[in-house]
Every structure is written in structure tokens, then in C-alpha cells.
């Protein structure tokens, strides 16, 4: 599992840097800000920043502030997502607002967001590169907020969204941070717009493939892998791609079986298992994986002009993301 070792090695370096930046007083505030970081995460986004820098000949040290900034923004979104969803557990530990209380959790999220931009301005890159990094990350944060609201709106509406509406939502909510991770890595190595655009495209398409695969696992994934019960997203009424496809293609009794479990907090284990079995019988997994593969191929094409170890590791990450087992 060479690919995992590369990611784990990178995570240790990033964690050390992150921990050095998340110290201060009041101590409890910084403990809350660092809580999720300390207790898990693969650091995929920082990994993408660093490898995107290296693929263009840049140094890891030049990319480290940007990599840490992206991870801080990611964790900021997790803290606030958990508050919005009233989730109690993440990474196997209590969420920040459950452990530290709502007021401290909100402020801890704000600290992570603010620190991200502070770290970028303290980097040793040129003023022009620093400005580009701040601008790209700020734009991504706006996209994430817009995507989050699209997701909320989608959940509140009774109508089933189209696949295009779903892709638009995940492009902003999830893929924006993958996109900016690779773009920022490129900016840490070069000022060539073509290279920055290519890496940005790789990240965006990787992010879409990642979310599509993640949503598939949320419906029919192995609980040992997902840490969630089978059909969890179905019970919660999440309008993810596999569920949209299933509702659209199911007919008669099959459709009733899916809709009986969909968004029903009182659905029994038997109801969920029946619904998941129907979704499997409709060939939804194969269709969803085809969609993920389509975006993975676009991502790989974006790196066609490059070579070297960093490219190989980014492609390996892409394969890992798309081929994750359910």
C-alpha cells in the first residue's frame, strides 16, 4: 500500500506544522480549534497542495503554509457543518461543539478560518504569489458557503433535484477546496497561468469524483469502512447521486420500497436493507462509478503534459479515491 504510506508520511509533516501554529491563549480556544486535527484526518488536501507544487519543480517548504491553510479551512467547515447538522461524533471523538460547547466551537471555527489567511501572509513567497494565494482561497471559501446553502436548500425542497443540480452543488461544496488545493500548490511553484489552470482542473475533477464515490459509500458502503449503518444517507433523506438515480429509475413496488426508507427517521433496519437491495438490483453502483470515472479521466487528462514522481502519486491518489470499495 505504497500510496497510503506516502499520504501518511505527508500527514505527519503537515500535522507537525499545524500543531506549531495552533497554540496560544486562551488555551481552551486553541485546544478546541485543534481538536479535530489532533484526532484524525488523512490530510488529502495538504497532500494535493504539496504534490501540485512538486509536479512543477517547487519545494515542499514553499508549499507548507498554503497546505496548512487549506487544512485549517477544511476543519473550519467541519466544525460549522457539525453545528448545523447537530452531529455528535467525528473521527470517533465528540464533535467540537459537543466537547467544548457551542460558543467556543463557533469561535474556534473562526480562529481556524482567520489563521489560514494569516499563515499564507507569513510565507516566504513573493508578494504577487501571496496575493494570488489569498485571492484563490477566499474565492474557494465563498464557493463552499454557496455550495453549503445549495445543499441545505436541496434538502428542504420536496422535489428531487436533477443530476446537473447535484453536480453544481458538489462542485462548490466539495470540489472547490480540492480545486484550490492544487491551484495553490501550483502557485507556490510557478506564475504560469497554464500550469495553474491544469492543476486547478485536476483538483476540481478529483473533488467531484471523490464526492460521487463518497455518496455511493453513504448509501451502500460497508459499515466497517464508513463507520455508519448501511443506508444511513437514505434514512437521512440525502439527495445524493445514487439516491437520485435510484428514485428516477425505480418503478412500481421498487420505487415504493425506496421511498418508504428515504428521509424516514423511523425506518427499520429491514426497511433500509430492502431499499438498499433494490438500489443494488437497479445497477446503481455501476452507473455511479461510471460517473465518477468520467470525472477521474478528466482529472488525469489535466496532467498529461507532466511527468515524475509527484505526478505518479497524484494519479495514484485519483485511482484510490475512485476505486474505494463499498
Image (cartoon, helix red, strand yellow):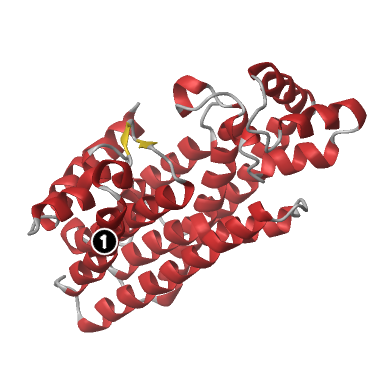
Q: Position of residue 160 (x, y in %)?
A: 76, 50
Q: Please, what secondary structure does the residue beneath circle 1 have?
A: helix
Residue drawn at point x = 41 percent, y = 51 percent: 83
Is residue 10 at all visible to an observer of this figure?
no
Residue drawn at point x = 63 percent, y = 33 percent: 265
| Horizontal relation, residue 249 to residue 179: left or right | right
Q: Position of residue 45 (x, y in %)?
A: 35, 51
Q: Which residue is mark 1?
A: 107
Question: How many numbered marks does the figure carry?
Answer: 1
| Horizontal relation, residue 85 to residue 253: left or right | left
The relative height of residue 301 versus residue 291 in the rendered view (above or below) is below
Q: Quadrant of residue 114?
A: bottom left
Q: Quadrant of residue 134?
A: bottom left
The relative height of residue 185 versus residue 20 in the rendered view (above or below) is below
Q: Farthest residue toward the top?
A: 270
Q: Nearer the viewer, residue 294 or 117?
A: 117
Q: Nearer the viewer, residue 45 or 74?
A: 74
Q: Position of residue 310 (x, y in %)?
A: 33, 49
Q: Position of residue 62 (x, y in %)?
A: 19, 64
Is residue 157 at all visible to an observer of this figure?
yes
Q: Nearer the viewer, residue 106 or 49?
A: 106
Q: Nearer the viewer, residue 114 or 321?
A: 114
Q: Farthest residue toward the right?
A: 252
- In the picture, the quarter occupied by the N terminus is top left
Using a 10 Å C-alpha cutoff, classify the residue at mark 1 as few (fewer than 14 neighbours), some (14 to 19) or many (20 or more).
some
The relative height of residue 193 versus residue 26 in the rendered view (above or below) is below
Residue drawn at point x = 36 percent, y = 37 percent: 90
- In the picture, the quarter occupied by the C terminus is top right
Amino acid at each position: 500500500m505504497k500510496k497510503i504510506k506516502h499520504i501518511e508520511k505527508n500527514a505527519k509533516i503537515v500535522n507537525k506544522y499545524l500543531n506549531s501554529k495552533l497554540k496560544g491563549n486562551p488555551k481552551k480556544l486553541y485546544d478546541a480549534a485543534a481538536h479535530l486535527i489532533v484526532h484524525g484526518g488523512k490530510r488529502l488536501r495538504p497532500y494535493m497542495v504539496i504534490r501540485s507544487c512538486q509536479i512543477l519543480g517547487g519545494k515542499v517548504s514553499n508549499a507548507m503554509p498554503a497546505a496548512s491553510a487549506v487544512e485549517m479551512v477544511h476543519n473550519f467547515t467541519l466544525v460549522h457543518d457539525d453545528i448545523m447538522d447537530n452531529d455528535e461524533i467525528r473521527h470517533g471523538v465528540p464533535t467540537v461543539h459537543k466537547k467544548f460547547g457551542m460558543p467556543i466551537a463557533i469561535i474556534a471555527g473562526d480562529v481556524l478560518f482567520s489563521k489560514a489567511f494569516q499563515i499564507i501572509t507569513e510565507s516566504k513567497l513573493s508578494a504577487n504569489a501571496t496575493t494570488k494565494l489569498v485571492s484563490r482561497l477566499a474565492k474557494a471559501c465563498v464557493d463552499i458557503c454557496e455550495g453549503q446553502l445549495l445543499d441545505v436548500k436541496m434538502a428542504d425542497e420536496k422535489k428531487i433535484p436533477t443530476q446537473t443540480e447535484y453536480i453544481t452543488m458538489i462542485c462548490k461544496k466539495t470540489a472547490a477546496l480540492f480545486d484550490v488545493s492544487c491551484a495553490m500548490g501550483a502557485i507556490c511553484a510557478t506564475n504560469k497561468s497554464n500550469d495553474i489552470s491544469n492543476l486547478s482542473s485536476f483538483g476540481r475533477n478529483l473533488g467531484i469524483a471523490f464526492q460521487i464515490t463518497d455518496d455511493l459509500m453513504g448509501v451502500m458502503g460497508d459499515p466497517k469502512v464508513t463507520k455508519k449503518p448501511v443506508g444511513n444517507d437514505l434514512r437521512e433523506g440525502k439527495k445524493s447521486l445514487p439516491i437520485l438515480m435510484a428514485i428516477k429509475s425505480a418503478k412500481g413496488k421498487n420505487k415504493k420500497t425506496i421511498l418508504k426508507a428515504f428521509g424516514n427517521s423511523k425506518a427499520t433496519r429491514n426497511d433500509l436493507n430492502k431499499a438498499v437491495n433494490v438500489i443494488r438490483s437497479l445497477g446503481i453502483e455501476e452507473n455511479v462509478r461510471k460517473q465518477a470515472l468520467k470525472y477521474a479521466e478528466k482529472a488525469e487528462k489535466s496532467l498529461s503534459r507532466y511527468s515524475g514522481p509527484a505526478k505518479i502519486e497524484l494519479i495514484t491518489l485519483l485511482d484510490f479515491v475512485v476505486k474505494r470499495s463499498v
